Amino acid sequence: MYGRSGVERACLGLQASCGADVNLLLFCCWMGARRRPLNKRFLRRAVAATSGWQSEVVQPLRGVRRTLKKAGAGLPRAWRAHLHANVANSELDAEYLEQRRLARLAPQAPRPVKGASARETVEANLERYLGLLGAPLGVAARRQLRILCAASVPRRI
């Protein structure tokens, strides 16, 4: 889903403006597309299962990657590029491990609701998750939510 039009930008926008974890955003979408509403209790468990990993591993790797992306850092360009690529791969590996952790939680999520709208379930999951973060949803954040909802449950032609 991350490769669909506008999704990366929407996720990164919500990460920057609301402090959202991109993997949790995608998890909310995935579960919602399967008509599985995530209540606050379950979302708190998901956040608890991933927040330490995010703060201790993913975010530091992201910081190192961003630093290496900038000119300078006291290293020749070729060395910096090589190290940047390795750190970027490590960051992706760390993100993948977080996704695996979330996937292991999925069977414990509330069951699908028959007849529920997948799109509305995605939207409710995302809003509940962002609500837990205490982030106000401004115009830009609402637009980003709509992009994620649309990408999660594409309209049939």
Image (cartoon, helix red, strand yellow):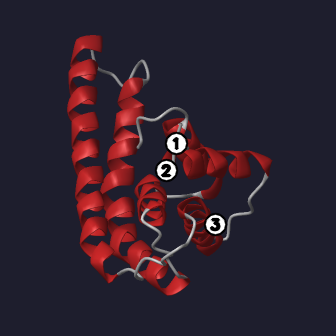
What kind of residue is marked 1?
A: Arg
Name the residue at 51% across, 51% down.
153
Label 3 or label 2, whichever lies nearer to me, is 2
**Disc 3 vs disc 1: Cβ atoms closer than 8 Å?**
no
Residue beneath label 3, please? 127
Looking at the picture, does residue 89 appear above or below residue 43? Answer: above
Q: Which mark is residue 152?
A: 2
Name which quarter of the figure residue 140 lies in. Answer: top right
Report how many numbered discs are placed on residues in the image: 3
User: Residue 135 location in percent, x, y?
Assistant: 68, 64
Q: CA distance from mark 3 to mark 1?
A: 24 Å
Looking at the picture, does residue 118 appear above or below residue 138? Answer: below
Circle 2 crowding by C-alpha within 10 Å: few under 14, some 14–19, many from 20: many
Name the residue at 33% across, 22% down.
74
Task: Name the N-terminal-most of marks 3 and 2.
Answer: 3
Q: Which secondary structure, mark 1?
A: loop
**Disc 2 vs disc 1: Cβ atoms closer than 8 Å?**
no
Circle 3 crowding by C-alpha within 10 Å: few under 14, some 14–19, many from 20: some
85 or 68: nearer the viewer? 85
What kind of residue is marked 3?
A: Glu
Looking at the picture, does residue 60 appear above or below residue 7? Answer: below
Quarter in which the N terminus is drawn? top left
User: Residue 67 location in percent, x, y?
Assistant: 41, 33
Q: Which secondary structure, mark 2?
A: helix
Label 2 or label 1, whichever lies nearer to me, is 1
Task: Name the N-terminal-most of marks 3 and 1.
Answer: 3
Name the residue at 40% across, 81% down.
111
Residue beneath label 1, please? 156
Q: Which secondary structure, mark 3?
A: helix
